Image (spheres, rainbow, N blue to C red):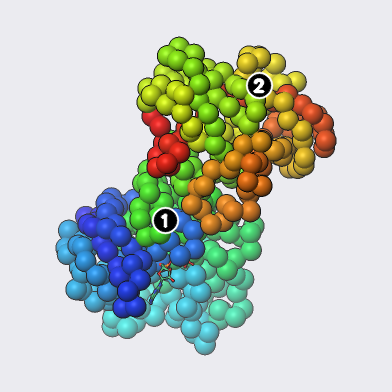
Amino acid sequence: MAEVVLDQIDKVYPNGFHAVHELSLEVEDGEFLVLVGPSGCGKSTALRMIAGLEEITSGKLTIGGRIVNDVPPKDRDIAMVFQNYALYPHMTVFDNIGFALKLKKMPKDEIDTRVREAARILELEENLERKPGQLSGGQRQRVAMGRAIVRQPAAFLMDEPLSNLDAKLRVQMRAEIARIQRNLGVTTIYVTHDQTEAMTMGDRVAVLKDGVLQQIDAPQTMYDRPHNLFVAAFIGSPSMNLFESQLTGDDGNLTVDIGSQKVALDPASFERRPGLRGYAGQRVIVGIRPEDIDDLELDPTIPEDQRIRVEIELVEALGSEIMAHFTVDAPAAETGDPDAVEEVGSERETKCVAKLDPRSRVKLRDTVELGIHTARLHFFDQSTGAAIW
Ligand code: ATP
């Protein structure tokens, strides 16, 4: 049993800064949990408290059923992988991987077995006699993983382990780490600011903002049912289009403003969200995922009252899809994500993006009709930012 349980963990730094607020998480035995959030949200602080590198101000931390608040890092049975790898440059790969075991005075043949097994898993067998300086970035990253693996810990803690790699290698290593973790079945807590990394690697993802847990869910659930505006804006690339709107109508018949245009809601949208009816006549925040907007030429079945007319301001043809950018004359939603600021247009307009099929023939400066899959719209309370369900 190696679940890691955080029970109302708080961190107040000596200067009075409250970095983590009552964080409660239950990471199951063998689970891969990703802690994600923008810079400064407290994710490293949380991980460092689990590792024992930072004191816990209040709350209870259990690893494998044992309360470890006051247990020193080396006795917590965890292995940490950092972004800078922390390899010893003068030692061979073999010695780097086996270093912690040597410190523990483990017999030589046992060290040899464990290091070779880790090297096999990580495909480093050819490189055991090399020094870190003779390795590629990806290989160095694997050596760092090897040092964690040989210790056979109860849990791996990883802090942005891929951030020093170039984009292509990062994608490759992300799949590799996820594969290794699944093969080993070791409970893993992985910190990143990159939502794609979080979504592709984690069994579950925990989103933090300003030291407060916003949502913890399986990646697809998080994407389909974000609990609030912050999560909605943070998860997904390109981001969800979010703007202020007015909801009008009554029970069987609701329409929503997309800027100065009105769009009828498919009955499925309020059947799925019974709470929406209570907002009729009120201002709400509407969210549209870029893939829920379609080129009518390719999908003419979208009803006439579920379309908008827009001028295309930028077309990015990415091969597998086309990103078509346009502006909606409605105020952008305040999402609380500092990185989202540049997405916002002027006070009364919102930059939006549609992810279209690559066969779409939309062109720059065309005025086109786009269809909105209104059953898949998201709605948020304007004052609290909470999702309306
Ligand atoms: P990043 O991705 O930039 O590393 P993070 O989400 O990991 O960000 P933390 O490093 O956990 O964030 O920091 C959370 C907050 O706590 C930040 O505002 C940071 O400035 C603050 N902080 C971190 N260490 C200390 C410290 N020793 N004393 C005071 N404040 C600190």
- Report whether 47 appears left or right of 327: left
Task: Answer with left or right where residue 67 lies relative to residue 39.
Answer: left
The amino acid marked with disc number 2 is Arg
**Which quadrant of the render holds ligand 1?**
bottom left
Spot occupied by residue 281 in the image (x, y as percentages of width and height) = 46, 24
Coordinates of residue 211 in the picture (x, y in percent)? 37, 60
Q: Which of 351 and 200 is in front in this view?
A: 351
Q: What residue is shown at x 55% (from left), y 65% (from top)?
A: 163
Disc 2 within 8 angstroms of ligand 1 (CB):
no
Q: Mark 1 points at which residue?
A: 209
The answer to which image quadrant residue 69 occupies is bottom left
> What's the residue at 52%, 68% (across, down)?
141
Whether label 1 touches label 2, CB < 8 Å: no
Q: Residues within 10 Å of mark 2 (few under 14, many from 20)?
A: many
- Measured as percent of width and height from the top left, residue 208 is found at 40, 55
Q: In which quarter of the image is residue 57?
A: bottom left
* Residue at disc 2, secondary structure: strand
Single out the residue that lies furthest toward the left: 66
What's the mark number on residue 46? Answer: none
Image quarter (top left, top right, bottom left or bottom right) of the N terminus = bottom left
Taking the image as drawn, is residue 226 in sight?
no
Q: What element carries label 1?
A: strand
Q: Name the residue under label 2.
A: 307
**Distance of mark 1 from mark 2, alpha carbons?**
35 Å
Going from the N terminus, do you reach mark 1 or mark 2 first? Answer: 1
**Residue closer to the observer: 45 or 337:** 337
